[in-house]
Image: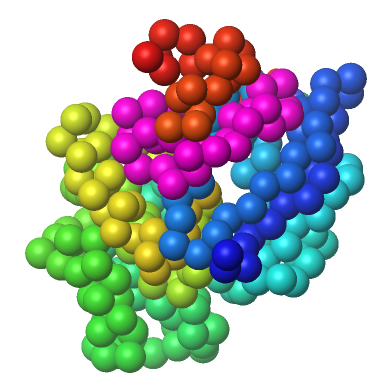
Amino acid sequence: MAEPILGVSGLRKTFGALKVTDGVSLDLRPGEIHALIGPNGAGKSTLIHQICGSLAPDEGRVFFEGRDVTASTPAARARAGLGRTFQVSTVIPEFTALGHAMLAVQARQGTSFRFLRPVAGDRSLREPAMAALARVGLENRAHVPAAVLSHGERRRLEVALVLALGSKALLMDEPMAGMGSEGSRELTALLSELRREAPILMVEHDMDAVFALADRISVLVYGRIVATGTPDEIRRDPVVRQAYLGDEAS
Ligand SMILES: Nc1ncnc2c1ncn2[C@@H]1O[C@H](COP(=O)(O)OP(=O)(O)OP(=O)(O)O)[C@@H](O)[C@H]1O
């Protein structure tokens, strides 16, 4: 079996008396979508924050490409290739899709002095930026400001940005949130293809998307992983059915 690209070992985090992450170990393997599911308040987002580095665990380690990154900043993890999607709508609404993607390429190239000269005509930025937009089907929307893009298009732009940043693995917190059925279908198809380039660890409440997309599912309940397995294994797991899925599993 291929070495995991991302690994979490014995992670613990408490907020006061609350054990939000209670000895979590999991991994992400090349080519897979690993979905993390669980009831509200189970600690899914807190776990993602610890993996991307915005929150320090009390105990445990995070490994990326075999390297211990537990003490690395989120920026250092992103530079190493651990990408996280973020809300484009909170960036620059007037900025075009292409502008966002060019900035991401520039960040990847680490040449901030380029700000001193016009970037718009710079082919070394424009070509990879356009390629990232084409990868998510937004090449025809390159010159549209982010504010004008639909919700689904903004989600796809987020994916283009992590690709333009050179991410080798993606962390996604509820990518399907707020999407209509059409947008969900498009994003499901995109993520399904994307896993070959960059495996995805995804927190998601949309069970249709999870069971359609995931190669493996881990179920988090009260900060502990109670089961990890294929969608079929998780559907049949009596502990999971009792703790979480209920009738949704049938
Ligand atoms: N900074 C914090 N300080 C104190 N408690 C926190 C903090 N962040 C999260 N919590 C608590 O930790 C628990 C887990 O929260 P978290 O957001 O990780 O759960 P979740 O599984 O992502 O939930 P949801 O599915 O509702 O998004 C919750 O009880 C939450 O109130």
Q: In which quarter of the image is the C terminus?
A: top left
Q: Nearer the viewer, residue 82 or 76?
A: 82
Q: Is residue 129 left or right of residue 36?
A: left
In the rendered image, residue 13, in percent from the top left (x then y), is placed at: 82, 36
* Residue 24 painted magenta: no
Q: Is residue 56 left or right of residue 37?
A: right
Q: Is residue 189 above or below residue 30?
A: above
Q: In this view, does 159 lie above or below 249?
A: below
Q: Which of 11 and 236 is in front in this view?
A: 236
Q: In this view, does 125 lie to the left or right of 35?
A: left
Q: Is residue 224 above or below residue 199?
A: above
Q: Is residue 175 above or below residue 83?
A: above
Q: Point out the quarter of the image occupied by ligand 1.
A: top right
Q: Which of 69 and 208 is in front in this view?
A: 208
Identify the residue at image location x=44%, y=62%: 31
**Location of residue 127 (image quadrant):** bottom left
Q: Quadrant of the N terminus?
A: bottom right
Q: Hey, which residue is sitting farthest left in the picture?
A: 140
Q: Is residue 205 left or right of residue 64?
A: left
In the rendered image, residue 40, in percent from the top left (x then y), is placed at: 57, 19
In the rendered image, residue 233, in percent from the top left (x then y), is placed at: 50, 32
In the rendered image, residue 181, in percent from the top left (x then y), is placed at: 19, 30
Identify the residue at image location x=60%, y=37%: 228
Q: Nearer the viewer, residue 93 or 160?
A: 160
**Range drawn in magenta:** 203-231
Residue 94 in view of the camera: no
Identify the residue at image location x=88%, y=45%: 59
Identify the residue at image location x=62%, y=68%: 3
The total of numbered circles placed on residues is 0
